[in-house]
């Protein structure tokens, strides 16, 4: 019994280390004093963090990524929650195909998705004779596609755990279908919605492949800024930027976890 | 409170009849129990009254108004669900207040009514708790309070006691019944537990395979069951299979010729069952006088139930009866293998077509 337990703990530790090693090294690197990332470090310093702000592209990239992520998440919720309800609650002919379709963007490679969207935007622009390609809203629309599967998936899981008789009880007590949704169903699926929003936002914020096809030159998201920076030089600024990102996501997760236990939903 | 009328109610799922042509009237203030084995359509009937299932045909009238096509939220019916269906994120008081809020009652009025209703189900001081902080019995009372708070025209109970342990169930039966009588609530309860049904009901409806088999008081169902199913389902019965030879004459498959109450079914020699109540049969070591039937037999099995003793007696290779005797001090208790005599009056039995 104890040996089995030991083996299990060892396996868990190895897996965790495997996942964490790159993060640990990046974080370590961000504090090196020397410019060329080589071991052992010559000393430690915080000046790479200050260097982030000397590069306006990092700041504007961060701002854009944040705006796109926030807006795409909001729209993703507005579309994803009703879609999840529709797929779990109603019986109709195209139910199963629709359910799969809603999760498809999780499986399709980002490059394929990006190409498809690029072609679509070009056609849209030609047909409608308006600016589409490279606009902020086109970028947001693209990100909605990758946010929505998370919302649909996590809300669907939440909905499966809702006791339908509580909804009937509400209607029995005089609540219309709409009031029942707001007062009974929505509170019950709130953890799924919060988790879906969080994962959707993180996915959008870190997305590279899709954005590559949709951004306008000179006005790009943070992951692209990082990629472009790396083409010119490798110094610990990149590591510092990564650390800031990791911290932000960790904080978001910790705050979320205070309200809904993520481990129970995902 | 109001009178509930169910008229020719039918529910079909494809070719399957869940409820066939059920008609019932529940008088103002009456406690009606739908009793039947699992799957006989009790819940479906109740849910059609509540408005959760749309009937294939038929009508539901409450207080004289046709409510068949009204959505659940426009019917003033209070329902207690088998699983209680309490709102997990709301406190006990908020659960009970829910229906009143939906009716747009004023806050002071709501608070007053919640307090009254919680007192009614003996849950004073529990208003601030969440459902998961309550025991099963307490949750059940919250569910009841929530349904009562809206002053429903009819109270609907779907197996409300099935999730309670045996001892608590007995107490709650009496509690619910007393509350119902005190408030004069028109009530329909669904159960498959005959003891529960007999304890609580003013009148019972026995259902089987979607149809009503018999409606009546406890005494009606017990003394005059309408068919073999009711005879077997309400109270206990022991059956002898055979045919009706002539009015008042029953021949068992084992060849015994018995006297049965005259004027009962004579189906031209078709298969029939003679149904007897085990506690109406008498057993003795010697033949008994003054009974219409008295037959020798061999004791095959004895089960000792405390207050009662069941004795299984074989009368012929094809006929076996269960006799129930009271466990009196110094009473006659035969042993397995012993030869005994079993007797009964013709009026103790009833013949049904098979
Ligand atoms: N939605 C449904 N589709 C098909 N059959 C159903 C449906 N709901 C109930 N039934 C069937 O109808 C019958 C009666 O069900 P129900 O009213 O729940 O029985 P009970 O008397 O145990 O409460 C059962 O045989 C059940 O399988
Ligand atoms: Mg049922």
Image (cartoon, rainbow, N blue to C red):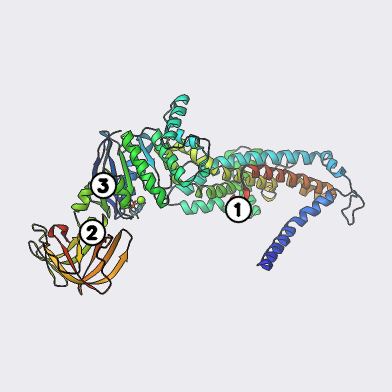
Residue B258 position in % (x across, y down): 12, 66
* Residue A27 left/right relative to B242: right
Q: Chain of mark 3?
A: B
Mark-to-mark CA distance, 2 and 1: 70 Å
Marking on residue B279: 2
Residue B44 position in % (x across, y down): 33, 48
Say if residue A216 shows up in the picture: yes
Q: In this rendered view, identify the residue nearer to me: A31 or B201.
A: B201
Quick one: SS at disc 3?
Answer: strand
Image-quadrant location for residue A133: top right
Give the class, few, some or many, for how many residues have Cα within 10 Å of label 3's Cα (few <14, many ≥20): many
Image quarter in which the N terminus of chain B is found: top left
Q: Chain of mark 2?
A: B
Q: In this rendered view, identify the residue nearer to me: B59 or B137.
A: B137
- In the picture shown, does residue B114 fall above or below A238? above
Q: In this rendered view, identify the residue nearer to me: A31 or A172.
A: A172
Give the class, few, some or many, for how many residues have Cα within 10 Å of label 2's Cα (few <14, many ≥20): some
């Amino acid at each position: 019994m104890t040996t089995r337990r030991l083996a299990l703990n060892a396996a868990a530790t190895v897996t965790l280390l495997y996942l964490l090693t790159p993060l640990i090294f990046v974080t370590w690197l961000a504090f090196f004093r020397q410019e060329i990332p080589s071991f052992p470090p010559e000393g430690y310093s915080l000046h790479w963090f200050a260097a982030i702000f000397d590069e306006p592209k990092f700041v504007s990239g961060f701002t854009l990524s944040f705006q796109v992520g926030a807006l795409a998440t909001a729209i993703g919720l507005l579309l994803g929650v009703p879609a999840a309800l529709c797929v779990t609650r109603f019986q109709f002919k195209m139910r199963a195909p629709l359910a799969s379709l809603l999760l498809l963007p999780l499986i399709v490679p980002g490059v394929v998705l990006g190409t498809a969207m690029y072609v679509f935007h070009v056609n849209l622009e030609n047909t409608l004779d308006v600016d589409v390609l490279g606009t902020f809203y086109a970028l947001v629309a693209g990100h909605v596609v990758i946010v929505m599967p998370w919302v649909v998936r996590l809300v669907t899981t939440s909905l499966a755990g809702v006791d339908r008789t509580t909804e009937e009880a509400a209607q029995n007590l005089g609540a219309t279908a709409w009031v029942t949704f707001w007062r009974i169903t929505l509170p019950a699926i709130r953890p799924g919605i919060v988790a879906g929003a969080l994962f959707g936002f993180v996915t959008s914020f870190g997305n590279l492949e899709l954005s590559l096809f949709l951004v306008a030159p000179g006005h790009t998201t943070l992951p692209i800024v990082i990629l472009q920076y790396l083409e010119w030089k490798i110094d610990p600024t990149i590591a510092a930027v990564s650390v800031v990102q990791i911290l932000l996501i960790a904080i978001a997760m910790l705050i979320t976890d205070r309200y809904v236990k993520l481990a129970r939903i995902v | 409170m109001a009178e509930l009328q169910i008229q020719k109610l039918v529910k079909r799922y494809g070719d399957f009849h869940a409820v066939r042509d059920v008609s019932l009237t529940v008088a103002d203030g009456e406690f009606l129990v739908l009793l039947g084995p699992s799957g006989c359509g009790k819940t479906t009937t109740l849910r059609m009254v509540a408005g959760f299932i749309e009937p294939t045909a038929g009508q539901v009238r409450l207080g004289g108004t046709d409510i068949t096509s009204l959505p659940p939220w426009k019917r003033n019916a209070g329902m207690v669900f088998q699983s209680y269906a309490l709102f997990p994120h709301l406190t006990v008081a908020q659960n009970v207040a829910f229906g009143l809020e939906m009716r747009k009652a004023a806050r002071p009025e709501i608070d007053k009514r919640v307090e009254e209703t919680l007192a009614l189900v003996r849950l004073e001081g529990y208003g601030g708790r969440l459902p998961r902080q309550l025991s099963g019995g307490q949750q059940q009372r919250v569910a009841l309070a929530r349904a009562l708070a809206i002053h429903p025209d009819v109270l609907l109970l779907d197996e409300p006691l099935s999730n309670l342990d045996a001892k608590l169930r007995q107490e709650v039966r009496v509690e619910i019944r007393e509350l119902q009588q005190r408030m004069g609530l028109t009530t329909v309860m669904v159960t498959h537990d005959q003891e529960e049904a007999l304890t609580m009901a003013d009148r019972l409806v026995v259902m089987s395979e979607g149809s009503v088999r018999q409606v009546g008081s406890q005494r009606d169902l017990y003394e005059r069951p309408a068919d073999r199913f009711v005879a077997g389902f309400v109270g206990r019965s022991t059956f002898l299979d055979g045919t009706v030879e002539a009015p008042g004459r029953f021949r068992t498959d084992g060849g015994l010729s018995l006297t049965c109450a005259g004027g009962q079914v004579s189906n031209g020699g078709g298969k029939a069952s003679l149904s007897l109540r085990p506690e109406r049969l008498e057993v003795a070591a010697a033949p008994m006088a003054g009974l219409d039937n008295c037959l020798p037999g061999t004791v095959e099995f004895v089960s000792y139930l405390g207050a009662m003793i069941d004795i299984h007696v074989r009368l012929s290779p094809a006929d076996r009866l269960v006799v129930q005797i009271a466990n009196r001090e110094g009473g006659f208790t035969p042993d397995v293998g012993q030869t005994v005599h079993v007797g009964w009056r013709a009026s103790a039995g009833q013949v049904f077509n098979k």
